[in-house]
Amino acid sequence: MTGLVLQALQRTSQGIDDEIEADAVRVGFTVTKKVGNSVVRNRVRRRLRAVADEVLPETALGGLDLVIIGRMGTIKRPYPALVKDLQMALRKLKADRRIEEKIKNTS
């Protein structure tokens, strides 16, 4: 059981004047009422935010809109496992900057 679900959308540069904003990674978090009451949902959201703050700055490709969805298993999942879940989700979506850099360096 994984602790999160990740969705990604590549932003288009239409209407964006600032190049820095176009390369930024934007992140949103969502946790449904199925996970628990508001106290539990907020705790899940805080855990996901901490994982995102640790993983995304060094690994996520620029120009993405990401949505991290908390699940019932997020609250009890160990923190290192959540970090690995997010890293694996980025790899599956081909949104991991480190993999892209390796591909460019070998070409």
Image: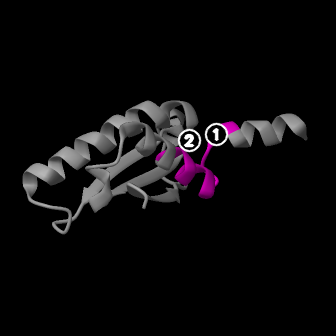
Q: Residue at x 41, y 45 (%)?
A: 82
Q: Residue at x 48, y 38 (%)?
A: 24
Quadrant position of the N terminus in the picture: bottom left
Work out whether 40 lies above or below 102: below
Amino acid marked by disc 1: Arg
Q: Residue at x 27, y 61 (%)?
A: 72
Q: Residue furthest left?
A: 38
Work out whether 55 lies above or below 39: above
Residue 13 visible in image? no
**Which of these two is toward me, 81 or 20?**
81
Decide whether residue 28 is among the magenta residues.
no
Percent coordinates x, y for residue 49 in the rendering: 31, 40
Amino acid marked by disc 2: Gly
Q: Going from the N terminus, do you reach mark 2 or mark 1 first? A: 2
Q: Is residue 53 left or right of residue 72?
A: right
Percent coordinates x, y for residue 27 in the rendering: 38, 47
Quarter of image, res 71: bottom left
Quadrant position of the C terminus in the picture: top right
Find disc 1 in the rendering and name its residue: 97
**Which of these two is toward me, 23 or 92?**
92
Please provide the residue range marked out in magenta.
86-98
Find disc 2 in the rendering and name its residue: 62
Which SS type dominates the magenta stretch?
helix
How many numbered marks have been drawn onto this rendered protein structure? 2
